[in-house]
Image: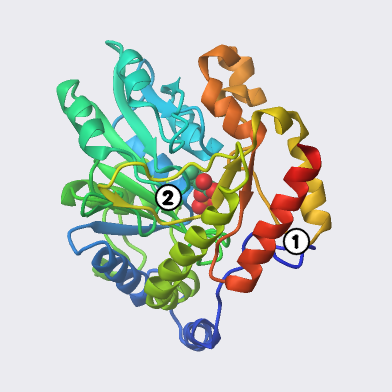
Amino acid sequence: VKTKTSIPFARPTIGDSEKQAVLEVLDGDVLTHGPQNKAFEQEFSAFMGGSAHAVTTSSCMAALHLACWQLGFGPGDEVLVPAQTHTATVHAVELVGAKPVFVDCNEQDGNMDVSVLRKKISPKTRGLIVVHFLGIPCPMDEVMQIADKHSLRVIEDCALAVGTYHQDKHAGLWGDAGCFSFYPAKHITTGEGGMFVTKHKDLAEKVTKVRGFGVDRKFEERKIPGIYDVPQLGLNYRMSEINAAIGRKQIERLPEILATRKRNFSRLKAQILSILGVHVPDIHFNHGKSSHYCLSAILPEKIRSHRNDLVLELNASGIGTSVYYPQPVPRMTYYRNKYGYEAAHYPIAELISDASIALPVGPHLGEAEIDEIAGTFKEVVERHL
Ligand SMILES: Cc1ncc(COP(=O)(O)O)c(C=O)c1O
């Protein structure tokens, strides 16, 4: 992620061990279908507590698409999705021909509002995708109760949720499937990449096959080279050995990365909340852990319409920022054209998109940078108040 600011919003933590691992793969003969992917899957599952079946993918979007497809969502089905998320969450539903039904979020933590979710269930609802907003856990016990009652399949979009727990269970293990992202700005990166995880062994096996063209046997199971059959449709959503080798080294850094993010988030939050009228979505019940992806500051009411000016002023002062997410997905042109849009149905998603600024807390920052971000943010906000 390149930015001109002196404190970028994100910077991948790539060291000598990642570089060495890549060189070792390049020095060998196996660039795909190899041991790095298998080891990365096992090590990621171990990080989550050991019970997950993990399948590497080329991105989180790929994992979400595979999940929607293999859980059987299709034409005539409705799938509940948060209005406040990355467009990938919703594209996955559209790609399999099902209809996304948007649910607004709550202001405390930015996650899907469970009371709205209940009201949007119809006889056509087949499933739902929850997104752990900025790594803040959704109340999965409540979500699963609703899902069980209505026989809904549950996908967890864990793009920002490496290290997120609800109670003592890692995100992605509550529902039928969890989808992770290793895009450069994320907790760990493989360049581009993702992970599909599930507690269902048979689902992991199905996904492994359709991830590689729907071929009936693995590379190492082909007795005669080049001979295989294809009993079903498939895609190529595999991860290369080069990316997987980077991911394995990144997992080793995870405990330290998560600890630094937590420290940075707490230090920044304490200072940001001292500005009157600013709200920071965060975990608001005691049954879990956030992965502290970033700190999203919702501006005081009086200056909400100044948000973009504030962003430009922060950037001009060297502070990298972002917006999570830039529009409620149903307001994006594709979805607005297809389904129409009524802003009044998504007041909190609108508020987050139009009046928040995301500030960095990543491991590229120490106490001095966090204090600089807080000081500059305070100065810029108070100038407008
Ligand atoms: C919630 C969410 N889902 C999915 C994605 C897409 O991830 P990827 O770029 O790995 O496809 C993102 C990317 O930021 C995201 O924030």
Q: Residue at x 65, y 28 (%)?
A: 301
Q: Tell me: residue 340, above or below residue 63.
A: above
Q: Tell me: residue 178, above or below residue 151.
A: below
Q: Position of residue 130 (x, y in %)?
A: 37, 36
Q: Position of residue 187 (x, y in %)?
A: 48, 62
- Label 1, on which residue? 3
Q: Earlier in the sequence, mark 2 or mark 1?
A: 1
Amino acid at the residue labelled 1: Thr
- Asked which secondary structure carries label 2, the reply is helix
Q: Residue at x 31, y 66 (%)?
A: 44
Q: Quadrant of residue 315?
A: bottom right
Q: Position of residue 21 (x, y in %)?
A: 47, 84
Q: How is the image coloured?
A: rainbow
- Asked which secondary structure carries label 1, the reply is loop
- Inspect this view and state whether residue 122 appears: yes
Relative to the observer, which residue lies in front, 218 or 150? 150
Relative to the observer, which residue lies in front, 326 or 190? 326
Q: Is mark 2 within 8 Å of ligand 1?
A: no
Q: Tell me: residue 118, above or below residue 22.
A: above
Q: Is residue 213 left or right of residue 125?
A: right
Tag of residue 207:
none
- Label 2, on which residue? 135
Circle 2/circle 1 CB separation < 8 Å: no
Q: Is residue 305 left or right of residue 111?
A: right
